[in-house]
């Protein structure tokens, strides 16, 4: 069952990392896209302990941190509490991708239960 996503405040600067004002989070909920400010990998590495402490302190309310290079997000760091909230949605996205992959590979061939058992060399009487 899908759970509603956790509502977060719109993206806003939350902390200074060196010369970069980092904007984290997202606005608008499911389906909206925000081009986030991206924390360079080197600064994320240097700030990791501080970021993890913030995640522990704020839990599900700790906004995600976008990390990448050349202002392009390559990944996102989020609190374990928030991950646990969105994990079912991630599972749904992955399952949908698998369904699309299988549909694309479907050759349309179908077999009956009896044909399947015969192909496997199983006597239907043995199943009773």
Image (spheres, rainbow, N blue to C red):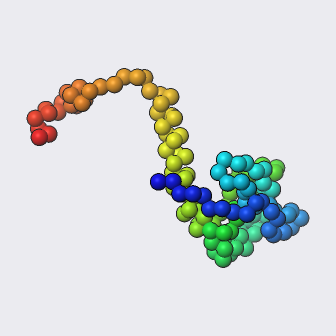
Numbered label tally: 0
In the rendered image, residue 76, in percent from the top left (x then y), is placed at: 68, 57
Q: Is residue 124 left or right of residue 92?
A: left
Residue 70 image offset from top left, x and y in percent: 82, 49
User: In the image, is 114 to the left or to the right of 56?
Assistant: left
Q: Residue at x 23, y 26 (%)?
A: 115
Question: If the image is split into quadrants, where does the C terminus sit?
Answer: top left
Q: What percent of the width, then of the height, locates residue 78?
A: 65, 63
On the question of residue 49 being in view, the answer is: no
- Residue situated in front as seen by the camera: 98 or 1: 1
Q: Quadrant of residue 19?
A: bottom right
Q: Residue at x 63, y 74 (%)?
A: 56
Residue at point 77%, 60% (across, down): 11
Seen in the image, is 87 located left or right of residue 57?
A: left
Q: Which residue: 81% across, 51% down? A: 71
Task: Look at the picture and state if 22 lies above or below 2.
Answer: below
- 106 to the left or right of 85: left
Q: Is residue 50 visible?
A: yes
Q: Is residue 111 above or below residue 17?
A: above
The quarter of the picture where residue 83 lies is bottom right
């Amino acid at each position: 069952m899908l759970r509603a996503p956790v509502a977060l405040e719109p993206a806003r600067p939350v902390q200074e990392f060196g010369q970069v004002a980092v904007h984290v989070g997202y606005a608008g909920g499911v389906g909206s896209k925000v081009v986030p400010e991206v924390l360079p990998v080197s600064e994320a590495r240097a700030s990791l302990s501080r970021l993890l402490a913030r995640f522990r302190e704020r839990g599900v309310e700790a906004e995600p941190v976008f990390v990448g290079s050349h202002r392009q997000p390559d990944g996102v760091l989020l609190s374990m509490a928030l991950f646990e909230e969105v994990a079912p949605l991630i599972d749904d996205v992955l399952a949908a991708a698998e369904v699309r992959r299988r549909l694309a590979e479907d050759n349309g061939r179908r077999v009956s239960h009896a044909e399947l058992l015969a192909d496997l060399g199983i006597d239907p009487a043995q199943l009773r």
